[in-house]
């Protein structure tokens, strides 16, 4: 056997042995593992950044004027308005899409806990085409309606909201029309707590549409709508199902948003972008066309299935997306490996209005189906309060990039000259 | 309007069908369809029988869900409008019309507008190589003819309903005003109604503006982003659609929508994406367009809406024998 130490020999041999199955993560893990960029892939500048409290804290003095006492971390206000919804903290539940992990009851448990927290919740694209809606004899359990009901039954008055995604293939199932005219969504609609999210792309596979792994029998049922590919080999029980990415230009995005606002005047309009190199321009087009929120999923994001090369090498990291978008005068929601307060605060300091929990939320619900997500969010909220108060800031809107230090950035010295 | 008691909801089937109001309204509707066939027949139109189901239907209906049909394992739709078939039919004849039943699962909020039925009928007209202005003339001529025909043929029924024939004097004598969407928006904003400049005139706005006039009028030039892909975009004013609505006077609201159609293959693909549609499902229609569809213009006039207007009814369900209101399960 020959060797070639200067090349990744094992990977090359795997491709030679397995064919196209080798460009994906191990299909045996599908349904149990959540996918996303490798923690060690070196793109996560945001994790390496440090939060840097100053010595002098004029805003703490301002807060002391309000309170007539020394402010403490409990005085940090977390309540916010994001994408038109009132939320107890700048955190929302990301879409899980139709990934099998989210379909196995965890989606419902996460919805119920998100409702209890009053945190806005996004329901992923393809849930209706893949799991059904939950009407006319379909199983309510995995369907869209089951998730909406679980959420609506738990959410306190005046808080939160449900966001329903639709992508190009969903348009065939008319997900938005279905929800907009369903009696179970009426209360959310009447209290201004229903939004629709136009899915332009996603972080885990920028430039591709959604992907899931299906059994051959399940694939037959959706073959009219999706591309089905024997990517794992003809002898495998599982096949790859792909959505198209959808074609967008500035004009197409602008007009789709106008039409959303025209057709669903009582629902909020959200737009989800993948971490494309023109993410700043796309976000500005969306806001100018009337989007209530733009969600940007960094290249670190993702729960579903993606080719390894996309997980490792495609798309801008979240921090670079934040730089390209800048701090907008509008709702900018971000996601991508968020699970605790520091990363959340760094995103807010870089201009985000709120952060989304995706894989972390699924893990938390998997750990404890009744309290896991609630506890995870409470931890994040407490850390946010501690960190913001350390920065001498009691309103999260006051956070700025100055609150962060990135390794390698030029040192700011006060005694120069 | 007549002030019929409790116009909010239809009564039971027996009470509705035996009501003198229903009977008068349905006889007036008969007169309207007869007048329609007379006018369009005189003007060289061929009446075709409308298809009821197809692989796709008109997607341009705000917030309304389509009805799925299991067609030997293929997902078909009930017609929300026959617009795609109207364009295709011009391959056979230059001037066609349908009296076409449509089904739209409208949003629940429309159950109280007095103007929305889930199941309704449209007088669907299409003319090859016509401009919008030419079909505006046809729509005006058709409505005038139908009103004159009905006033002549349905005197007793109109009297039963207390409809004052004077209400139609201006309609019969003066041309219908044509205002742009932009003008309608600024008129509404002047009346302190918060109308969006990017969207269709909302239902309340339509009622307000229609209360200001003594005869029907056209709103033309809707902005792109307020209508489906079939509405043609101006070649000289990007972002402006070559379309129109016909609005009745006295608060009766929209009777008819139409305009020039998108018919060129590449423009259809672009406009489909701009309206969030997946071109793949329109394969049969796009195949025709790729080989060539004639440019055309046309409109769909709501039969029950015209009946309500001419008969002066409070609610649209009074103009239908088996009314289905959004969200309400009735026979």
Image (cartoon, rainbow, N blue to C red):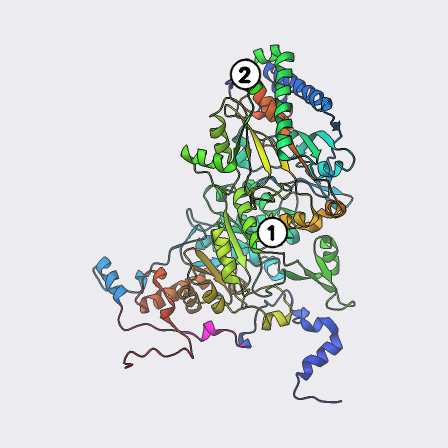
Identify the chain of the residue marked 2, using the numbered disc in the image.
Answer: B
Residue with the mark numbered 1: A141
- Check the residue under mark 1 and report the chain it is in: A
Magenta residues?
A42-57
Q: Residues within 10 Å of mark 2 (few under 14, many from 20)?
A: few
The one nearer the camera, B54 or A321, is A321
Secondary-structure class at tag 1: loop
Q: Residue at x 30, y 72 (%)?
A: A54
Q: At 64% from the left edge and 31% from the top edge, which residue is drawn?
A: B134
Q: In this image, B180 relative to B31: left or right?
A: left
- In this rendering, the answer to whether A109 lies above or below B53 is below
Image vertical order of residue A2 relative to residue A122, above or below: below
Task: Rate crowding at label 1 as few (under 14), some (14 to 19) or many (20 or more) other CA atoms within 10 Å.
Answer: some
Please tell me whether mark 2 sits on a helix, a strand or a loop. helix
Check whether the beta carbons of the residues at disc 1 and disc 2 lie within 8 A of each other: no
Residue B280 part of the magenta-drawn span: no
Residue that mark 2 sits on: B169
Residue A231: numbered disc: none
């Amino acid at each position: 056997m020959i060797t070639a130490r200067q090349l990744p020999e094992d990977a090359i041999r795997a491709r030679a042995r397995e064919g196209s199955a080798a460009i994906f993560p191990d299909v045996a893990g599908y349904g149990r593992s959540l996918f996303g960029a490798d923690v060690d892939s070196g793109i996560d500048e945001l994790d390496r950044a440090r939060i840097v409290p100053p010595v002098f804290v004029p805003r703490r003095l301002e807060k002391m004027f309000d309170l007539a006492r020394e402010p403490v971390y409990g005085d940090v206000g977390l309540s916010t308005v994001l994408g038109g919804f009132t939320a107890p903290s700048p955190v929302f539940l990301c879409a899980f899409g139709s990934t099998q992990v989210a379909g196995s009851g965890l989606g419902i448990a996460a919805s119920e806990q998100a409702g209890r927290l009053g945190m806005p919740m996004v329901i992923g694209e393809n849930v209706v085409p893949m799991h059904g809606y939950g009407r006319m004899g379909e199983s309510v359990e995995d369907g869209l309606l089951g998730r909406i009901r679980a959420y609506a039954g738990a959410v306190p008055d005046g808080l939160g909201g449900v966001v329903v995604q639709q992508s190009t293939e969903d348009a065939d199932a008319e997900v938005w029309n279905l929800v907009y005219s369903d009696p179970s969504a009426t209360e959310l609609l009447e209290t201004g707590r229903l939004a629709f999210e136009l899915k332009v792309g996603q972080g885990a596979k920028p430039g591709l549409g959604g992907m899931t792994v299906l059994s051959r029998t399940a694939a037959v049922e959706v073959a009219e709508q999706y591309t089905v590919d024997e990517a794992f080999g003809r002898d495998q029980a599982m096949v790859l199902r792909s959505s198209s990415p959808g074609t967008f230009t500035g004009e197409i995005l602008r007009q789709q948003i106008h039409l959303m606002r025209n057709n669903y005047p009582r629902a909020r309009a959200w737009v989800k972008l993948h971490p494309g190199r023109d993410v700043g321009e796309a976000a500005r087009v969306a806001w100018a066309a009337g989007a209530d929120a733009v969600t940007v999923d960094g290249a670190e994001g993702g729960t579903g299935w993606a080719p390894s090369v996309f997980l490792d090498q495609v798309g801008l990291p979240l921090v670079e997306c934040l730089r390209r978008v800048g701090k907008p005068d509008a709702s900018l929601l971000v996601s991508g490996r968020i699970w605790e307060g520091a990363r959340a605060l760094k995103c807010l300091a870089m201009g985000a209005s709120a952060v989304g929990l995706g894989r972390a939320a699924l893990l938390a619900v998997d750990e404890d189906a009744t309290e896991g997500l609630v506890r995870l969010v409470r931890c994040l909220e407490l850390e946010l309060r501690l960190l913001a108060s350390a920065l001498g800031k009691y309103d999260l809107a006051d956070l700025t990039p100055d609150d962060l230090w990135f390794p390698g950035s030029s040192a700011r010295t006060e005694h120069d000259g | 309007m007549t002030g019929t008691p409790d116009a909010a909801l239809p009564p039971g089937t027996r009470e509705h069908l035996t009501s003198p109001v229903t009977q008068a309204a349905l006889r007036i509707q008969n007169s309207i369809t007869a007048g329609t066939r007379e006018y369009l027949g005189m003007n060289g139109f061929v009446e075709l029988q409308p298809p009821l189901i197809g692989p796709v239907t008109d997607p341009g209906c705000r917030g309304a869900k389509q009805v799925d049909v299991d067609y030997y394992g293929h997902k078909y739709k009930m017609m929300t409008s026959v617009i795609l078939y109207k364009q295709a039919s011009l391959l056979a004849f230059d001037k066609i019309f349908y009296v076409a039943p449509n089904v739209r699962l409208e949003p629940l909020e429309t159950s109280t507008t007095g103007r929305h039925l889930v199941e309704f009928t449209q007088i669907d007209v299409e003319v090859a190589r016509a401009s919008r202005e030419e079909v505006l003339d046809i729509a005006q001529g058709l409505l005038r003819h139908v009103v004159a025909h009905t006033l002549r043929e349905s005197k007793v029924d109109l009297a039963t309903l207390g409809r004052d024939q004077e209400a139609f004097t201006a309609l019969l004598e003066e041309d219908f005003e044509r205002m742009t969407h932009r003008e309608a928006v600024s008129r509404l904003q002047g009346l302190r109604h918060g109308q969006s400049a990017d969207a269709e005139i909302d239902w309340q706005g339509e009622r307000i503006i229609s209360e200001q006039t003594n005869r029907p009028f056209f709103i033309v030039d809707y902005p792109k982003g307020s209508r489906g892909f079939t509405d043609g975009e101006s070649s000289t004013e990007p972002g402006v659609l070559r379309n129109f609505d016909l609005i009745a006077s006295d608060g009766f609201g929209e009777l008819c929508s139409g305009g020039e159609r998108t018919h060129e293959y590449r423009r259809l693909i672009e406009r489909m994406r701009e309206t969030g549609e997946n071109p793949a499902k329109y394969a049969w229609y796009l195949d025709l367009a790729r080989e060539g569809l004639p440019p055309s213009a046309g409109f769909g006039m709501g039969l029950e809406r015209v009946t309500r207007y001419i008969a002066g009814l409070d609610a649209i369900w009074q103009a239908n024998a088996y009314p289905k209101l959004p969200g309400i399960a009735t026979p």
